[in-house]
Each structure stands twice: as structure tokens, then as C-alpha cells.
Amino acid sequence: MPLVCPDGAVVAYAWKRQLAGQAGASAVDRTRLALKAFTDQKRRFFPHLDDEEDGEGTDTVSKKHRNLPALAEDNQDNLSDCKTLSDVLTNLEKEIPNLKVSTYERLDWLKRASSLPASANDNTMEAPKHNFHSTSILRPAPQNVASMDKVAVIELFFPSIFRAVVSLHPAGSTDPDSVAFFSPDEGGSYMHSRGSSVYHVFRQITEHATVALQYFLGIRSKTALYSLLHWICSYQTLFTKVCNKCGRLLAMDRQSALILPPVHRPYRTLSVSKQSSSQSISSTLDQGSNAPEAYHIGCFSDNM
Amino acid sequence: MSVVYCHIFRRLISYNPYRKKSTTMPLKRVFFWQPNAGSTVNSQILNEVSQCVESINGVKEGRWKATLTFYKPMLRDQALSAEFPREFIGISLPEQPNKYYFVLRFNKIVLESDSSIQLIMEKLQSYKSRVALNFEGFQYQLGDFQLRVGKVVPSHSENLRGIVMEVEYLPISSLEKSKQIMEEFFDIWQDAISKRSLPGRFIHIEPDFSDYGLADHYTSQHTAVQYTHVTSQLIASVQAVQTGRN
């Protein structure tokens, strides 16, 4: 039976009526949701058809996600995604000490962005429900599970250094679709994952991050979010790590005639196995052999 | 009676709610020109400095002006003047047109207040301006950096007493996190200006902000403290030149 949405559009497949009927969902969103619902149902009722996909699974991180026990039978589909997202964020918080991770529903993020930089001076977060704490998934209360389902924006905040905004599509999944960097003191409704900072340094990083995101989605789509978030965290040394090629922090970029710090961090060689996480990508701020590399725009070449 | 005024004023300073709410500003360092021994500052140096900014792709944007005033207490009995703070300074900054800053350098106090305080002071007649200095010049944009180059002149004269330069890094406001950036920028600047063989150099001496109760996040109060220190250093170097002459 077809579903007629509040804005008059007709949805042919009514398997996931609630999701499909979300106010404001575009036709593209609804199609994506329908496809996802179809795929989830197929995986559940016809598991043998999925053997090909899951069989090889050499990536240790995605294997770990599949072994997690489900909490409740009826929302198992949503939960396997939620647990994965929570897992990714929990791992991140554990590995990287200075980082503050927060998650938001899409409209909530717009409200927060407009109220920034009101709390720029202090690092206290506002409503606890937006704070992502690793302890929250240990509580069996179902409301945490439901809120993870709607998470559409992840905010990574390194106090006094930068703020990165990552958008997930669809909400609650581990599929990032856009990312942007901003000054820690910036605020306004233009601050979202497809927005642009007023400062050159963050605009350049956002451009580079968009390319990195496409790489992560293309080559490592199952761990794209994990890779992206870890790669974003390598920028915490933005104002201290000198360029690996020229040895300086600031350099005049010939093309834009701007003086910039090293805004490029290589993404092709980023390793996401469990072994590398214990090396702790963020452990040192100097040129240790494990520290991620940094390059000025002019010092960076594409095969890095 | 005048002692009572002083106490009232000190209470105003301690309990002023504005003190805590200062908004974060981008990082700034204020430099002053130190002429070499035997030479003085002149407008030719100012021109060369401005040209140097443009040579590193600085785009001239507009004018700027800050003022600094030394106040002295109006006392019936001048013998009491020793009881009053030795240097009581008032500063106005172009980025904060509605504010006025007070610094008591020897007591390590800085206060941000509404600019209408100047009207109140005039009515009270408790303190009068002894010496006033203007810092004025042009502002330049260099990507995420903003530079201001300015001459230091007494308020009712055209005598060039010094040159100051402000270097501001707009994206962040943490003093600690921006230290390397500011130092490297100054290295780039030094490379450029040393080619002009000018008889002197720019110096920055970072005041101890924590003495004034200021935190790591940069504010206009930090700027007021920097201007206070730069002025005292300028005065010291001018006096040194004069002593040298005598």
C-alpha cells in the first residue's frame, strides 16, 4: 500500500513507513532509505544471499562490529548500525585525549551552530544528551539507542585549535557524506558540513578533507567513518607541526599568495588496523616516526 | 576626601562585572620600533615598513587609531599625590569603539569599561589627562593575518615619537597554541625587512598576562596591557636617546 507523505509525495515502498515519512526528506533521501530498508530486510530473511559480501572481510575493525551482540530483536536492523557508530565514536574518544566528540540530530546542530561561539571561552558542553560519552552505550536504557538512530552530525572539537563537522547520511549510519573545518571561535548558521569557514586556513583544509573523504569512501567504504575521524584528529597539530618537506611551520603559498601552516595531511597511507591505534596517532606533537606527516600546499604531491 | 575617591574607584574596579565577560579576540602581538644606538625614528622608516608589508602581499585596507592617556589625580594638596597609583592609564582601541580600558601598571590591574566612563570622569574632575598619545596608521590584510603599522604622536602635535606594529592572527585566540605561528611569522617579517637595511628593529616583549589576572584566551584587555608596556618601553628608549645626547 503506497504511503502519501505530508508534503504530497507518494512513496511506493512502505516497509519502513516511519523513516520514509520523515518530514522534509527529499526524494533522494526517501529512495536511499527505501533501498537501505530493502537491503536490511534482504540480509535478515535471505542471509545466504549475502555470503559473498561478508565472506572475505579482511578488515579487523569491520569484523569486530559484526560480532557485537544485538540488544533487542525488533530493532536489530537499526541497532547494528547504531552500535557500530557508537563503537567508532567510543574508540575515538579513548584513543585521543584532547578531543571532545558530540553528536546531534540535524536540526539540533543548526541551533547549536547559530549559538556559537557563545561558549568559546569555556569548554563545558551544553545539554548532556548531545555529549557523546563512551559510558552511555553501557546503559541498557532504550532511549540512548533511539537517539543514536537519529544522529546526523558529528562534531569534533579540539579546544583552541579547530572544530570539524561531519554529516552522516542517512542519520544513524556510519556513512559520512560531507565534512568541514572551522575556527574554534567561529559561529553562525553557515557552520555545517557543507559550509565554508571565513578563514583561509580552514577553507584549505576543508577542500583537502573533501578529497580525503572521497578516497575513504571509495577505497575503504566499510571503515570510511573511522578512517575519516582519525584522519581529522591528525589536524590537532595544525599550529605546531612543521612541514615534513621544508621544515617550517608557515610558508607563503605561491598560488594563493597566502601565508599558511601545513594544511595537508596524507590520507592514502593511513592505517586503521587495531595495531596502529595503539601507536596512538595523536601521541606526539613533534616529528616522532609515528606522528602523522604534514605538508604545505606547495610541498604536497598527490601520491602521498 | 580625595582618599575616599580613590577607595571608591578601587571598589568599582574590583566589583565591575565587565571584568569577567570580555569577549575572545584573535591573537595579537604589538611590536615597537627600537632605533639603533645613535639614530632616531623618522617618517622615512615608517614608509619603508609600510612598503615592506606590501611586498609580502599585504593588502592595504584602511586607517586605524588607538589612544593612550596618562591621568593624574586632581588634588587640593599636591603632597598627597604620592598616595595615588603612579601610572594610571586610559586606552581606547579601534576594534572596541564602545569600550575604554584602564591599566594601573604598577598595581597590575586592567579594567574594561564602557566608553561613557570618560564622560563620568570629566564630570567628576577627579582625574585629568596629563599626556595623551595617538597611535595611528594603516591596516593591511595578509590572508589570515592582519597587520597594523602606526606612528606614535602626542595628541596635539605632529612630532613622530615612535612606530608600532600590530600582528594579528585571526583564526585562533589561544596564546599558547599560537606561539609558534607568531614566532615564525616574525621570522618571515624579519627576512623581508632586513633587506632594507633600516637603522633599527621591531621588538616584542610579552608582558606577563597572568600578573594582570588574564587567561590564555586573548582579549582586548590583553591588547590594552601590551600598549601600556610598549608605551613605557618607548618612553624609556626616547629618554635614553636624550640622556645620550646630554
Image (tube, rainbow, N blue to C red):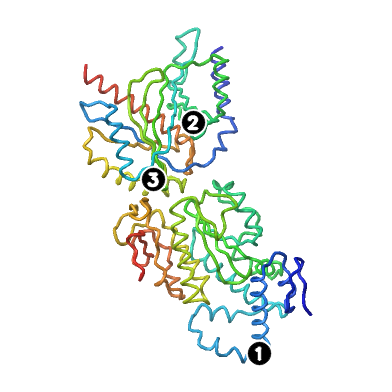
Which quarter of the rendered picture does the C terminus of chain B lie within? top left
Mark 1 highlights which residue? A46
Between the C-alphas of marks 3 and 1, the distance is: 61 Å
Q: Residues within 10 Å of mark 1 (few under 14, many from 20)?
A: few
Taking the view exactly as shown, the residue that stands out farthest to the top is B76
Q: Quadrant of residue B107?
A: top left
Q: Are marks 1 and 2 in contact (CB under 8 Å)?
A: no
| Between B166 and B207, the one nearer to me in the picture | B166
Query: Amino acid type of disc 3?
Result: Leu
Q: Chain of mark 2?
A: B
Closer mark to the observer between disc 3 and disc 2? 3
Question: Residue A193 location, x and y as percent?
Answer: 55, 60
Query: Amino acid type of disc 2?
Result: Val
| Between A194 and B123, the one nearer to me in the picture | A194
Tell me if residue A254 comes above or below residue A280 in the rendering. Answer: above
Question: Residue B177 location, x and y as percent?
Answer: 42, 49
Closer mark to the observer between disc 1 and disc 2? 1
Q: Chain of mark 1?
A: A
Mark 2 highlights which residue? B110
Question: Residue B15 location, x and y as percent?
Answer: 59, 30
Q: Are marks 3 and 1 on the same chain?
A: no
Tell me if residue B64 comes above or below residue A187 in the rendering. Answer: above
